[in-house]
Amino acid sequence: MSAHASMDAARIAGLAQAGADVRVEVVAQTGSTNADLLARAPGLAGPLLLVAEHQTAGRGRAGRSWLSEPGNSLTFSLAWRIDGGPARLTGLPLAIGTALAETLARLGQPVALKWPNDVLKDGDKLAGILVETTAAPDGATWAVIGVGLNLVMPDELEARIGRPVAAMPWLARMDRDALLAALLDGLAGALRAFERGGFAAFSARWNGLHAYQGRPVAILDRGAVLHEGLAAGVDDAGRLLLDTDAGRIAIVAGDVSLRPRET
Ligand code: ATP
């Protein structure tokens, strides 16, 4: 555990620009910021950013877990209300990945995207995104967008995760509140663009950041190979286009995972 100054909600909110109208809360510890916001969303008056200094039961897709240590990572969730039903959120996790990658690039840290919703640095996972939803009483949908971003990755944590993962020590040296404000601005700007134009406003940008463009990949469902082919980017609905022996197919994210194949 490394010593670090705690984050300051008022300061994050004060530094934010595009996200200036988002309420910010910082808690010392919680199980899962996504679980907390999903429970609170129906009663929220507007968007809310919940930052946990320490998240003890972080979640990934399909019941997987996200591991982190206080001071060495960012764990936060943003609750955002979107007009219409859940179908309006098609492609949102990929739009969020695009926004994170573009924000990190602006901070001098280029990254790439792995379909559907991982941010990679030098081929290893730097950040994970988990979008969950709950209905608002008026028929709108609350999107709860969870992000875990590694700043420093101690060897023992990497060993517990059980695969090589990436970190960003350069960002660890940055003012934590300013870093959160920059990420909030990127997400708020992206969410407004998404509300106007859906994922179509992001697909070309996502493809420009794609880690495996033209490369052989496999699509797995709980470890079993469903498809193999060359990754050809995403379409305007955020589906992965895969060039297989039988032609081009489009894959919906669901719970499947992508792995690069050895060439
Ligand atoms: P995959 O990474 O297999 O494609 P996924 O994209 O669905 O699956 P998520 O559900 O987003 O993965 O994230 C959970 C997974 O991320 C865990 O199963 C674990 O392998 C990995 N993981 C957990 N903690 C971290 C971390 N701090 N940094 C990087 N990877 C992590």
Image (cartoon, rainbow, N blue to C red):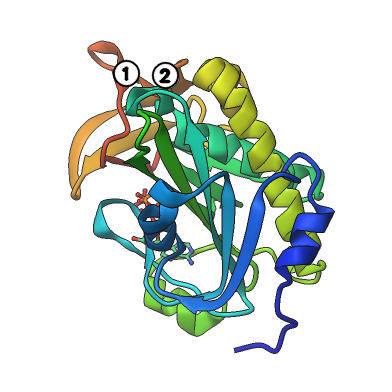
Q: Is residue 5 above or below residue 76?
A: below
Q: Residues within 10 Å of mark 1 (few under 14, many from 20)?
A: some
Please name the amino acid that badge 1 sits on: Ala
| Mark with earlier residue (1, 2) | 2
Q: Does the residue tagged 2 have its C-beta within 8 Å of any atom of ligand 1? A: no
At mark 2, the secondary structure is: loop
Ligand 1's image quarter is: bottom left
Q: Which residue is mark 2?
A: 237
Residue at the location (66% across, 88% down)? 2
Q: Quadrant of the C terminus?
A: top left
Q: Is residue 233 above or below residue 1?
A: above
Residue at the location (53% across, 45% down)? 45
Frontmost residue, 249 versus 236: 236
Looking at the image, can residue 210 be seen? yes
Frontmost residue, 213 versus 7: 7
Q: Which residue is mark 1?
A: 250
Q: Which image quadrant for residue 35?
A: bottom left
Q: Is residue 67 left or right of residue 103?
A: left
Frontmost residue, 181 versus 102: 181
Looking at the image, can residue 203 be seen? no
Please name the amino acid that badge 2 sits on: Ala
